[in-house]
Amino acid sequence: MTDIVVHPAPSPSPISCQELLPWAAFVGLLLLMTLYFVGAEQGATLLMQGDVVHEFIDDGRHLLGFPCH
């Protein structure tokens, strides 16, 4: 005879807004930074000197339809 014990599956607990809000703010900030570097990191709002950032994300800029050169 085998001793197999079946335990009920744990039910997921709901995530409260207080726990979700910091992660949503963090992801939103990352998305805004990505949008800035892809769309505007050149010209008058240049944060990093040189063309390194521009050349690194040049294909992504063209793919998203941002004017580049």
Image (spheres, rainbow, N blue to C red):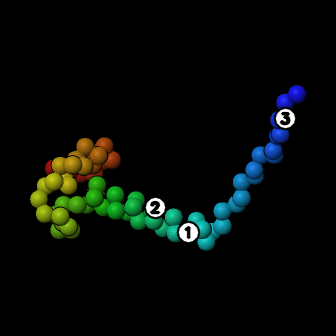
**Residue type, label 2:** Val
User: Residue drawn at (51%, 64%), measured in percent from left and top?
Assistant: 23
Nearer the observer, 69 or 51? 51
In the image, 62 versus 3, the foreground residue is 3
Q: Are marks 3 and 1 in contact (CB under 8 Å)?
A: no
Quadrant position of the N terminus in the picture: top right
Residue 21 image label:
1
Query: Considering only order in the chain, which callout, 2 or 3, is on the residue closer to the N terminus?
Result: 3
| Residue at position x 75%, y 50% in the image | 10
Mark drawn on residue 3: 3
- Label 1: how many residues lie within 10 Å, few (<14), some (14-19) or many (20+)? few
Residue lying furthest left in this view?
50
Q: Left or right: 58 with respect to 30?
A: left
> Which residue type carries mark 3?
Asp
Distance of mark 1 from mark 2, alpha carbons? 10 Å
Circle 2 packing at 10 Å, graded few (<14), some (14-19), many (20+), is few
Residue type highlighted by circle 1: Leu
Q: What's the CA distance linking mark 3 and mark 1?
A: 45 Å
Circle 2 is placed at which residue position? 27
Give the CA separation, mark 3 to mark 2: 47 Å
Q: 31 left or right of 53?
A: right
Residue 38, quarter of picture: bottom left
